[in-house]
Amino acid sequence: MGGRKRVYLINTGGTIGMARTADGYAPAQGFLEAQMRRMPELADASMPEFTIHEVAPLLDSSNMTPHNWVQIAQEIHRHYDEYDGFLVLHGTDTMAYTSSALPFILRNTRKPIIVTGSQIPLCEIRSDGRENLITGLLLAAESEIPEVCLFFGDRVLRGCRAVKTSARGFDAFDSPNYPPLGQAGIDIIIHRERLWRPDAGDAWLHEGHLDATSVGALRLFPGIAARVLENMLMPPIQGLVLETFGVGNGPDQHPEFLAVLQRATDRGVVVVNCTQCLRGAVSMGDYATGAALAKAGVISGHDMTTEAALAKLYTLLSSDLSPAEVRRRMGRSACGELTTA
Ligand code: ASP
């Protein structure tokens, strides 16, 4: 008998472990653990054993930065050999950014890394955190999931495909361009054929300094001034996710706008085209309005989410790679974040 599985639980903050304050919910050190001590079901023999690591300070995830992503990845890597899986408790606001970034920072995991949280804190009677926590722990103990997942409500989503789609619902996340990896209903079902297949070899950490890397995202809107784009593309920016219309279109009757883009891409800024639409991929050859962006040096983000494209830019641009190589790698799947035709 192998004994109970062991899970390393990292509490980064977020609603799940928050306490009521005069200013609304806020993180409180030690509070999550106190709530968990009041959950006898966590000690049930069917649950994995777990160790809790509380990050200090705990954060509302709206305060998270790439530095925090790296800290989480390092913490997992440090304990990688000691545990069967990892559960990251996180605020929902930027959870999809973190779940998108982790697979680019901690590469080639063979163990489940589950990111979850809740819309209502554990200390409240109607908290959705209880189910998310229990099932999250069980999923982290499931050694067949070799990737970073976002688990929320009843769905297991690929982390680098996830987006937050509801500010208040218990089904707050979706992965519109990739089917769920699993479903937690009466049974927990994992769709093995959808899981990422890691390369042979060990998990490894990305070494670059994300903090020293300058990337941005800009959502196009009708009437956007060239000056707005120009400001966005000012040095030291190295990469930009341009959120475009439909299949990747922008204003081709706006020569100054296109000239600003051209000057930036000529300087080596990597501009990635991701659609504002929730579903579907960029195809810059379909319309003249898309072809104009391609001519100005913009590259396709295919069906990547902005969250994933930003994380990928951060990691590639903090590596020692030429802009040409970054552009090439942006178009290839590194951890299942995009589909190419
Ligand atoms: N503001 C909270 C956070 O992201 C929201 C949540 O966790 O649901 O940390």
Image (cartoon, grey):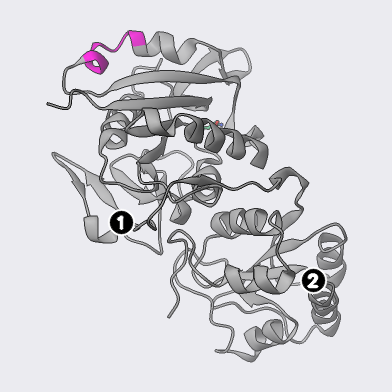
Main secondary structure along the magenta-highlighted residues: helix
Q: Which residue is mark 2?
A: 268
Q: Nearer the viewer, residue 73 or 80?
A: 80
Please state the extent of the stretch shown in magenta in the rendering: 37-43
- Label 2 Cα neighbours within 10 Å, binned few <14 / some 14-19 / many ≥20: some
The structure residue drawn at horizontal position 66% and vertical position 71%, both measured from the top left corner, is: 325
Farthest residue in the front direction? 201
The structure residue drawn at horizontal position 32% and vertical position 8%, both measured from the top left corner, is: 38
- Type of amino acid under label 2: Gly
Circle nearer the N terminus (2, 1): 1
Q: Residue 143: where, in percent of width, then height?
A: 27, 40
Q: Which residue is mark 1?
A: 195
Task: Judge whether residue 42 is colored magenta.
Answer: yes
Q: Nearer the viewer, residue 309 or 118?
A: 309
Q: Is residue 39 visible?
A: yes
Task: Judge whether residue 53 is colored magenta.
Answer: no
Where the C terminus falls, by quadrant? bottom left
Residue 225 in which image quadrant? bottom right
Q: Residue 40: where, in percent of width, then height?
A: 24, 11
Q: Residue 322: where, in percent of width, then height?
A: 73, 68
Residue 299 in which image quadrant? bottom right
For the image shown, how many numbered marks are present on the structure? 2
- Type of amino acid under label 1: Leu
Question: In the visual, does 26 lie left or right of 202?
Answer: right
Image position of 208 with respect to 152: above or below? below
Q: Secondary structure at mark 1?
A: loop
